[in-house]
Image: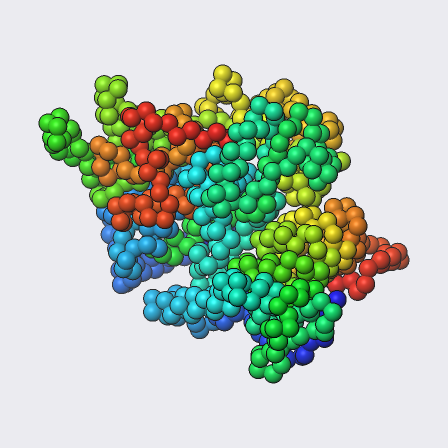
Amino acid sequence: MAAPRTSLRLVAAIWSTRGIHGRGGAATPEGSQKKGKTLLQFLSDRFYDVEFLREYFLQRQMLKVHQKNRSFTHMVEQYGPYIVGACFILDQGGMVKFQNNDWIGPKERGRFALEFSKFQEVSVEAVDASGCAINYEGLDNLLLLRNLQSLSLQHCPHVDDWCLSRLYPLASSLQELSLAGCPHISERGLACLHHLPNLRKLDISDLPAVSNPGLTQILMEEMLPNCEILGASWAQGLNVEPEEQPQDKASPVHV
Amino acid sequence: MLRRVLRLASGRALVARALSTRRGGSTPGEDRDGKVSEIKKKIQSILPGEPWNPLYDTSHLPPERSDVVIVGGGVLGLSVAYWLKKLENRRGAIQVLVVERDHTYSQASTALSIGGIRQQFSLPENIQLSLFSANFLRNINEYLAVVDAPPLDLQFNPLGYLLLASEKGAATMESNVKVQRQEGAKVCLMSPEQLQNKFPWINTKGVALASYGMENEGWFDPWCLLQGLRRKVQSMGVLFCQGEVTRFISSSSHMKTTSGKEVTLKRIYEVHVKMDHSMEYQPVECALVINAAGAWSGQVAELAGIGKGPPGTLQGTRLPVEPRKRYVYLWHCPQGPGLEAPLVTDMSGAYFRREGLGNNYLGGLSPIEEEEPNPGNLEVDYDFFQDKVWPPLAQRVPAFETLKVRSAWAGYYDYNTFDQNGVVGPHPLVVNMYFAAGFSGHGLQQAPGVGRAVAEMVLEGHFQTIDLSPFLFSRFYLGEKIQEHIII
């Protein structure tokens, strides 16, 4: 169950996946190596100062992500786990839905309105963290929301296999999970989802790091028999004759 | 290496061209080409910025002096090199040279390992080392980031280890899990019924208790870690040399202890590095030597004179690390355990894990002392699989009764015959030799932590992050065993 989002956040998400100085090399396939280096790369090879500056900017970028994912667990005694978790998600730019209430999301310029007194004891039902820079350390804060039922981590650039291995505390309540479009998730992380027996809907479409989407879909369906898995169809990756078209069971096939 | 391949390819092309034009009579054109390129090379070597080799090419030799010489270029040696350069207080303060005998790593334990990482140990220090290493591997693209290089993909499978215990071992397992939880490992205990529910393909007969690692446990690609470390360490200025250490030249000083006993302290000041397939060697002056030679650390220690003395004394205590051969078999089982299978270790010691998505599995068994295979070569004994590995696995997982062995390989454990735990830190008598070896099958998963510990010992003089004082060499002389009970 995804919440309605503004187009502004989508643009921000795309910009954040491509690092400066060509750091986002994870998405480039092997055959497309550029002939001839850029000016920055040429200067880096010749001058130590330029190389040092580029390393410095790289470290600064990584620090920014860490800063966003700092731990808020010290505030739990004062505000309760649900408020702290919700504040973390809203701070990152996501949206939260408390039980029996509407979706709360950020207004302009990233500010959000949260009535602390009203929501102290109300558990968070659904979280839409699409496009947020949440990573392994940030999951500390997300896992405070014990009764979470629906989690959407679509297009999160820093969510990887390690993060998926950390989702097991939500096993008793989590029913919907969406991982579409995360560039670092592979079938090895998806295998840890067997800790979540109550999962009913799982979206694993458009995962570029999964080596064999059709086969992964079949193996995931075997692993989680009660779950409806959206994503690749079993025929994806097969060499099909032009006359015979495979029967697509799932919604849009991403090729 | 790419340049070498290109040179070879262009060399072959030149020969082909020469052969094809030989039919038309030899033209003076080829000779001129060869002479021109030689003249070009001579001019290039005179210009500034290139090494000056007036007599002969010395580019394959190590430098004449280096502050630290690391013997062994596997994951432990490279980890020590990385942390030494990372923790130095000024850029370029320490010159490090890594000497590796075999640049193809054909017999190195790192490359032949199945790459597992677990926190389920019985010693707190081992658990801490493993947790530190899991942290390192998780953030590997921050630690080993090189500008303009693609990020590393370790292919980590976070599926955990499942250790099974019978009635006899259940109490030990519970106390071990308690220690693991105290150190911060996330391990859960399961009863046979829970085990059957979670993994229906297991036969729980004889199992009284199982411990399952939930986080930070699994397996990864050790070759990727090795190449990542190599790349980063080269970018930090560490020099590599392909050669074998054949001799240590040391100076000794006779001193008296406070109780009046005579002690001879030795200091290595020169390392002789011999090149491959030749008698040529280069003496490298050094301040420190780090012994990270893995299965051959015992031989390297003997070169430094460790263990040459009357038995029972400190001079006569040798480094008890020797190579032990272990087999790993790869088989295909069409109805085997699915995607969720962790690395399962049976009570008998047999273990297996899933490999890839095609119903292939890797596994093996550590033989008992009396049946240790001869470590002279890396030949695989398939009868060992038939007699010793397959029966317990087939009993534990009934689907494995029909399987087909696809291939197998053998590798060395750098086995510490004293207590199966690593040796870290300086030698009491040869004062500038530091050890980082003897990890008996769990060296790869502890390499980042051990590297940091040795670097801290070298730079600060004491352990800072993780206290590995129980792992010092002196325990062999004092007879204090720190036995690790969970060895796979």
Task: Give the quarter of the image for residue B358.
Answer: top right
Q: Looking at the image, which residue sits at the far top? A: B370
Whether residue B1 is visible to the viewer of this picture, yes or no, is: no
Whether residue B211 is visible to the viewer of this picture, yes or no, is: yes
At a point 39% along the width and 30% down the height, the residue shown is B482
Q: Position of residue A69 (x, y in %)?
A: 52, 65
- The coloring applied to the image is rainbow
* B199 w.r.t. B92: above or below: above
Q: Could you tell whether A5 is left or right of B62 in the image?
A: right
Task: Give the quarter of the image for residue A184.
Answer: bottom right
At a point 15% along the width and 33% down the height, the residue shown is B252
Q: Nearer the viewer, residue B453 or B327?
A: B453
Q: Nearer the viewer, residue B322 or B187?
A: B187
Q: Give the mark count.
A: 0
Q: Could you tell whether B309 is left or right of A109 in the image?
A: left
Q: Position of residue A243 (x, y in %)?
A: 89, 58
Task: Give the quarter of the image for residue A208.
Answer: bottom right
Q: Nearer the viewer, residue B238 or B213?
A: B213
* A95 w.r.t. B157: above or below: below
Q: Could you tell whether B91 is left or right of B34 in the image?
A: left
At a point 27% along the width and 59% down the height, the residue shown is B90
At a point 62% along the width and 76% down the height, the residue shown is A115
Q: Position of residue B387 (x, y in %)?
A: 63, 19
Q: Position of residue B390 (x, y in %)?
A: 65, 25
Q: Looking at the image, which residue sits at the far right? A: A243
